[in-house]
Amino acid sequence: MDSQVNPHTGARSAVAPGQTGTPRIVGAVWGLLVLNTLGSAGAKTIVPLPRSLIQMVTMGALVAAFALALAVNVRLRIRPSAYLLLLTLLLVSSVISSANLESGFGALFRCFRLALFVGTLWLLSRWWDGSLTFVRHHIRAYFAVLGSVAAGLVVSPGAALPDLYGGRLVGALWPLTPPQIGQYAAVIIGLTALLLLGRRTDKAGAAVIIVASFVLLALTHTRTATLGLFLGLALAIGSLILNSAAARRFFTWAVLCAAVAAVGFASALQTWFLRGQSKENFSSLTGRAKVWDALLAAPRSTSEQWLGVGLGDKSFGGLPIDNSWLAVYNEQGLIGITLVAVIIVVLGAVALLRPPSLQRACAIFLIGYCAIASYTEAGLGDASPYLLHLAVAASLLASPAAPPPPSAPEPPRRPEVS
């Protein structure tokens, strides 16, 4: 008999050889959810892909994910989850705000997509047991996406580093923008680094993932993802410092390396950070502030203020909002903002109340990253990678499932008298 470690108590429980807690098909479902959230808008690819085809693939991936999750959980066994309950309330609010068709029939379609997305997560919640299972699924899925980005860079460097995006890395095989690539790279760098710190992965494999992803992150020149990575890791490692000598050593070396880099490469880092922008453009967050001011100044009815105008494409006046809170305010109103804020606060509070562990550190990293990125990226109010990041955090913070009660022994039979 093998043994399995309880992620919260450290106790070992017997597991039959070859037995696994999570079916392999769950990993496939997670990969399909990741494919669905890649989106259909981005850079021009080497082989032109019609947007309708991309949307058909992404939506088909979501339908397939729901069908597979239903097939593997045919008895509809789910686990209670405050995160999923709040997402369900956000879905209900979104349906109510979209019902008046102020944003067109597309709003109802987006509500249907969000419903399938949340429903799939509910079906997968059966296997949310505080283990690192979904962390590994997350890393594998997004590293595969980054593999397609790297392949596009090798096949056609000109298409992968176009002048239209200022020479920043984009997806040349699948239409991905620099912020998307930067987000995926930052998240798997942080999670892999934490797994390495907790000795849950081999050094060679971790080095390949971290180095390759960091190169792609640097080529995207994505400031939000870079700040989210370092600040999120600081929070995660800080949660381990008091209980882990490895975390203290890692933190010390990280501070020393950061100090040396700040002194020795200050000019190069400043050039990378500014991306050739003027101080005025930088101070306005690449024009985002103008869109935000216009959105907040626009007149709204009481219904629009509380419920929003319905799910849309996260834009205002034809320009991207690029702020999760303002995007939620525009589409789901003050009620939506309240629900999203409660999601972040509840997950953060549960993480702080958990005893120090690698699972807790990974959850803190994901929650911290999403909170930081929400200032310049939209996605917390609709089916998106950010909701998948938070779902992984919720799976890490879930309590281990209670083992089934032992069956009562059969009473001894009385011998028959012949």
Image (spheres, grey):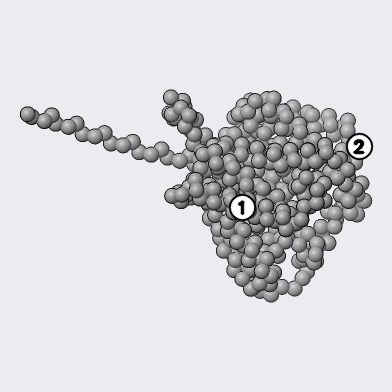
User: Callout 2: helix, strand or loop?
Assistant: helix
Residue 105: quarter of image: bottom right
Furthest residue in direction bottom, as rendered? 301
* Front-lying residue, 315 or 16: 16
Which corner quadrant holds the C terminus?
A: top left
What is the x, y in percent for residue 185?
73, 40
Q: Is 204 situated above or below 399? A: above
Q: Is residue 235 left or right of residue 398?
A: right
Question: Residues at badges 1 and 2 in contact (C-beta under 8 Å)?
Answer: no
Q: What's the residue at 58%, 58% (across, down)?
A: 115
- Mark 1: few/some/many CA within 10 Å (<14, 14-19, 20+): many
Q: Earlier in the sequence, mark 1 or mark 2?
A: 1
What is the x, y in percent for residue 321?
77, 59
User: Callout 1: helix, strand or loop?
Assistant: helix
Which residue lies under the disc numbered 2?
267
What is the x, y in percent for residue 388?
63, 48
- Mark 2: few/some/many CA within 10 Å (<14, 14-19, 20+): few
Residue 324: quarter of image: bottom right
Q: Is residue 412 left or right of residue 146?
A: left
Residue 161: quarter of image: top right
Q: Nearer the viewer, mark 1 or mark 2?
A: 1
Q: What's the residue at 79%, 29% (across, down)?
A: 257
Tag of residue 62: 1
* Front-lying residue, 311 or 224: 311
Amino acid type at circle 2 is Ser
* Front-lying residue, 413 or 207: 413
Q: What's the residue at 59%, 54% (across, down)?
A: 63
Tag of residue 366: none
Amino acid type at circle 1 is Leu
- The answer to whether residue 360 is seen in the rendering is no
What is the x, y in percent for residue 51?
75, 56
